[in-house]
Amino acid sequence: MLIYCSFGTSMSYQTSMVAELRRATKDFSPEMMIGGGSFGLVYRGLLSNGMSVAVKKCNAVGFPDVRAIRAEEETLGKVQHPHIIKLLGHCQWNSTHLLFYEYYANSDLYSWLHDESRRWAVSSWETRFRIVKGVADGLAYLHGLDNPIIHRDIKSENVILDSNFEPHIAHFGLARWMEASHTHVTTEPDGSVGYIPPEYLAGSNKATTKGDVYSFGILMLEIATRRRLTQLTTFDAQKMEVVEWVKMMVVNYIVDPSNPNQQLVAAANLSHYFKIAWYCVINEPQYRPHMKWVVERLNEIR
């Protein structure tokens, strides 16, 4: 079922849809709230036809906020992929914008990785690897469109899990369609701390698919190590961030099967997995692979 109210929909239709969403969420009751972020609060709702939805309530107060809402609508309204969240519609209620999506039973990946009371559900390597492959497939699809889409905010909080723990890329407020040059001009290093590619932090005003590749590589490391990106760890008595730690592990342990100190090798081909992640987080974007290559290499892991 697809319900769709765009920015140009008639006032009467938007009014009826707003009424339906208010009823579905018990007038946006706190008891129905399931999440939130920089772009608004998210509520669970049950439509009159029995369909469960997630409703994002955004109070747009300026151009950047409206642009984020339009980015969400323009990108998700035109893509269909099993690992990308489904936008069902959008309507406006005074200065409040309501975007509603297919509801997925489990929340974001971050909470399942780092909440001690929940992490048992993604404790198996098989589950975590399936999540990685699903996100990779979704990103490869976005980057492979005739007019590719750059997500620009890939992170564990923006991966939503369904009842089978299948991943769905969400929150496209920073996403942009790429021009023919395969870049998008931006004025600031959009993204989240720890996931932002080094070229953005260095002042580059060109967003590319290789930025998403870097963020995905960071996500691979987070999923495999279950360490927060800002959490320091130790290698040879030296404190370092997760990315540098994994690079050291790849160089010193994982790529050498004869080394007896393979603490991280908990499954067959895990060394291959870390090598793929390492390629993704190379500092120089021109040396990072494309997501299609990443998917192909992940498919080689049994």
Image (cartoon, grey):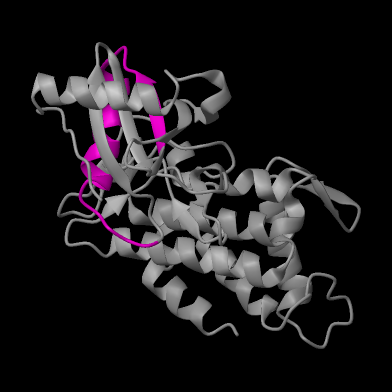
Q: Is residue 30 left or right of residue 25?
A: right
Taking the magenta stretch, the answer to whether it contains residue 175 is: no
Number of labelled discs?
0
Residue 62 in picture, x, y percent from top left: 29, 14
In-front residue for pair 118/125: 118
Image vertical order of residue 62 relative to residue 48, above or below: above
Which residue is painted at 32% across and 32% down in the image?
99
Q: Is residue 151 left or right of residue 270?
A: left
Examine the image and state in which quarter residue 90 appears: top left
For residue 203, say whether it is visible.
Answer: yes
Which residue is painted at 23% across and 47% down in the image?
2
In-front residue for pair 78/214: 78
For residue 288, say whether it is visible.
Answer: no
Q: Is residue 167 left or right of residue 182?
A: right
Which residue is painted at 84% across and 82% down in the image?
259
Q: Is residue 229 left or right of residue 183?
A: right
Which residue is painted at 41% across and 75% down in the image?
293
Image vertical order of residue 280 relative to residue 111, above or below: below
Q: Residue furthest bottom?
A: 258
Q: Quadrant of the C terminus?
A: bottom right
Residue bounds of the magenta highlight: 54-82
Residue 148 in picture, x, y percent from top left: 24, 56
Residue 152 in picture, x, y percent from top left: 39, 44
